[in-house]
Image (cartoon, rainbow, N blue to C red):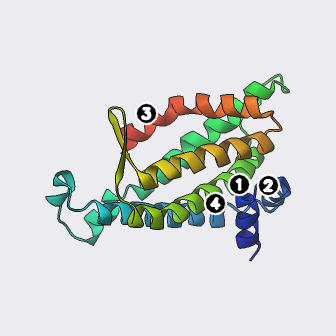
Amino acid sequence: MNLIHDLIGMLAFRSKVIQSRVQRASLISSFFCFVLGFFAFVTVRKTVYAELPELAGRQGDALSFFFDLNIVQALLFVSLVYIPAIMLLGKAIAGREGRISLCFADYRAHGSVLLPLWGLLLLITAPLQYLMPQFLVLGIIGISVGMFTLLTLLFVYTVWAIMHLNCLTITQALGAFCLSWFVLPIYYLIT
């Protein structure tokens, strides 16, 4: 029940909840929340866009369906690349330590906050993706309403979490978040 209470508190931007999650530092439940949210969003997205020509020809068994979801790849990327990048960038921008290093306590703190938060945001936007599969066309870019909402929520909540996890100002947290985008091509290499 603490996890559900903490997730609701994070949605309400309560900074005390971040400290509560850091003290509990439960990575197993955090990984589970992320996987659940990712599975829900990707499954809904695949179902909604199954009629598109790129996806219509893909048929297969349950195992191929599971691997097409990229859950394992997303989990590896987020846990082994993205969270450590955010940690290092947060420390570098804060400039408090002479030596920038990774430690398991910091990893556990970041993972226990960011993973369930991202999983919850994915879970929240999955029904929106189902109900509004239309695309917004922004110049030459087309993006679904659900994906646009998800990216906006991820942006706002991740910057807020980075700010509180690393004791940064909003500008510093925004800088750390934007610099973390440089590791995103690694996700595409993994998938």
Pointers 3 and 2 in contact (C-beta within 8 Å): no
Q: CA distance from mark 3 to mark 2?
A: 29 Å
User: Where is mark 4, residue-wise?
Assistant: 116
Q: Residues within 10 Å of mark 1 (few under 14, many from 20)?
A: many
Is 85 on the left or on the right of 169, as rendered? left
Q: Secondary structure at mark 2?
A: helix
- Image coordinates of residue 109 in percent, x first then y, are 75, 51
Q: Secondary structure at mark 3?
A: helix
The answer to which of marks 4 and 2 sits earlier in the sequence is: 2
The answer to which of marks 4 and 3 sits earlier in the sequence is: 4
Q: From where the camera sits, is residue 155 visible?
A: yes
User: Where is mark 1, residue-wise?
Assistant: 113
Pointers 1 and 2 in contact (C-beta within 8 Å): yes
Q: CA distance from mark 3 to mark 1?
A: 24 Å
User: Where is mark 2, residue-wise?
Assistant: 18
User: Where is mark 3, residue-wise?
Assistant: 185
Q: CA distance from mark 4 to mark 3?
A: 23 Å
Mark 4: amino acid: Pro
